[in-house]
Amino acid sequence: MRIGLGIDVHRFDEKLIGRFEIANIENPLYPKYLFEKNEKVEFRSKHEVIVDGAYIDINPAAEEPDILEIVRKRVQESIDFAMYYNATEIIFFIDVHS
């Protein structure tokens, strides 16, 4: 079994990850993660990196075109973020309502 640790990219430290194999960069679309002034946080790791995709207030099943446009934008931003950090995976959490 491979085990990882969720971490804030702004506070990343290789010592925190230690013996874990995976660094999971927590949801990049929380306001503190957005690239302010288009500046990206320098981050390189010897660990495998995975990224949480956008999921807060995201509903890919919405029928409203304006909402779907925002969903598409946030998904693309998640992909761009993951590519920048050379992530091997993106995990999208979907809230399924009954």
Image: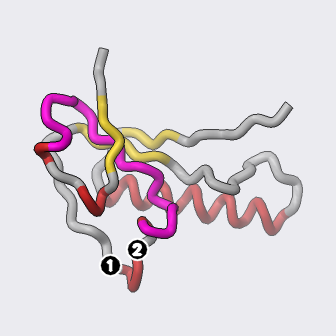
Which residue bears the numbered disc 2? 35
Task: Identify the mark at residue 39; answer none if there is no mark.
Answer: 1
Q: Quote the CA–CA distance across marks 1 and 2.
A: 5 Å
Q: Is residue 53 above or below residue 5?
A: below
Q: Residue 28: where, in percent of width, then height?
A: 45, 58
Q: In the picture provided, is 74 more to the left or to the right than 67?
A: left
Residue at the image point whose x is 36% and y is 55% from the top: 83
Residue 71 versus residue 1: which sits nearer the camera? Answer: 1
SS at badge 1: loop
Q: Quadrant of residue 50?
A: top left
Q: In what quadrant of the picture does the C terminus appear?
A: top right
1 and 2 marks in contact (CB < 8 Å): yes
Left or right, 75 with reference to 3: right
**x, y (%) of residue 25?**
36, 49
- As for residue 28 lying within the magenta part, the answer is yes
- Stretch in magenta: 16-32
**Residue flagged by tag 2: what amino acid is it?**
Phe
> Does residue 73 belong to the magenta stretch?
no
Quarter occupied by residue 41: bottom left
Residue depicted at x 17% and y 55%: 44
